[in-house]
Amino acid sequence: MKKNSTLLVTGGAGFIGANFVHYWLNNYPDTKIINLDSLTYAGNLTSLTDISSNPNYTFIEGNITNKELVNKIMDDVDIVVHFAAESHVDRSILNPEIFLETNVMGTHVLLESAVRNKIERFHHISTDEVFGTLSLEDLNSKFSENTPYDPRSPYSASKAASDHLVRAYGETYNLKYSITNCSNNYGEFQHPEKLIPLTITNLMEDLEIPVYGDGMQVRDWLYVQDHCKAIDMVLNSENTDKTFVVGGLNEDIPNIEIIKMIINLMGKSENLIKFVKDRAGHDKRYSVDWSNIKEKLNWTPSVTFEEGLQKTIDWYKNNQSWWKPLKNDSKDFFLKNYQGR
Ligand code: NAD
Ligand code: DAU
């Protein structure tokens, strides 16, 4: 990567994108970032207020499906880091179509433009959900770079399609690309529709915590700044591997135990736990074997789950003006998703 590269970050006003923009400008102050984001319900410019006047940062409000706009922007770009997506599984169950538009067609538009403009590198942010579900009985099973694709929700199917498109553009048009498939991120700036911030903010408001099914599903939790570091190492690596899976430090903790840990850390009551109807097609277990990225790039997650959870709780306690309006704006979704469950 050149010292003064220009990065096009898509979805930089979302959770991971905003963390990445902060991470990048702190670590590479001489590079330029163009943040292209259409500001859906999940995009929030208040996550970026502190850097909005940085001369190396430009925000463009626009949709990644807009070919003309994307082509115009791509002209000045060296590297694309593609976060923009519809990202919430429950929303994909209620309304799949927008997931195909953004995650599949949007990625296609970016890829076309990247090829046309001879972009130096296209880095695609993907998910471990493309691999489907692991068994709760065999805790030794883990996702790796060699796991076959088996997506089971409209969200993960759309992400799988986008991964395939990126690889196809690499093979067919010689686009230089890399992909990271990471596990569940958590940390600051995450929309309160997702399990950890939903639990923290509901507890702060003395609202019930909806637990899908029996709460025994397992996720692999990755602190968001560790994820940003992994992307950095992949972008700066000369390694010829195209795909890396990225995961966190926790070991198979069921959702219900995560919720109890948060309740305990916040000194709240378990009476607020409410078991509700399960998510349709709910994946049972995710767990990531990140030994390959450790071996090839020397990346390891650094933040323990306990440490990350405490930092996250503190952040939501101290930033109520950030998340309260988001919960209010998503009232319709919360009603649709949780009513009658
Ligand atoms: P998010 O939902 O918080 O943010 C998505 C951002 O993309 C928002 O700012 C939104 O406005 C923007 N966006 C959506 N549609 C757009 C469009 N058509 N054009 C331009 N911008 C658009 O998502 P996130 O949790 O930050 O996830 C970022 C990426 O990481 C996604 O690709 C997601 O699939 C992937 N991922 C997320 C996680 C996780 O745990 N959050 C884990 C693995 C992979
Ligand atoms: O694995 C990576 C994926 O992690 C990303 O690709 C997605 O973008 C991201 O949203 C996340 O998907 P999940 O579906 O795993 O995350 P979510 O926070 O929605 O749910 C985590 C677990 O908690 C899951 O087993 C469902 C459960 N859950 C979730 C909500 C919102 C509940 O029990 N109750 C809830 O109200």
Image: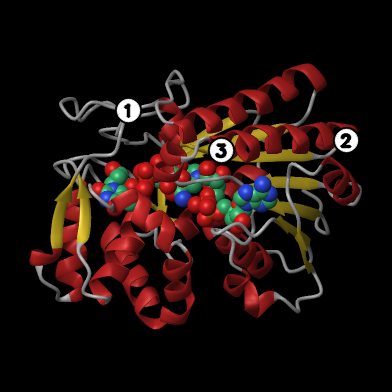
Find out whether the residues at labels 3 and 1 contact each other: C-beta distance under 8 Å: no
Above/below status of 71 relative to 149: below
Above/below status of 332 relative to 129: below
Neighbour tally class for label 2: few under 14, some 14-19, many 20 plus, Cα within 10 Å:
some
- The residue wearing badge 2 is 118
Q: Is mark 3 within 8 Å of ligand 1?
A: no
Q: Nearer the viewer, mark 3 or mark 1?
A: 3
Of 207 and 11, nearer the camera is: 207
Find out whether the residues at labels 2 and 3 contact each other: C-beta distance under 8 Å: no
SS at badge 2: loop
Of 256 and 79, nearer the camera is: 256
Q: Earlier in the sequence, mark 3 or mark 1?
A: 3
- The residue wearing badge 3 is 99
SS at badge 3: helix
Q: Earlier in the sequence, mark 2 or mark 1?
A: 2
For the question of whether residue 230 can be seen, the reply is no
- The residue wearing badge 1 is 133
Q: CA distance from mark 3 to mark 1?
A: 20 Å
Taking the image as shown, residue 11 lies to the left or right of residue 139, namely right
Query: What amino acid type should be assigned to the residue bearing mark 2?
Result: Lys
Quadrant assignment, res 241 = top right
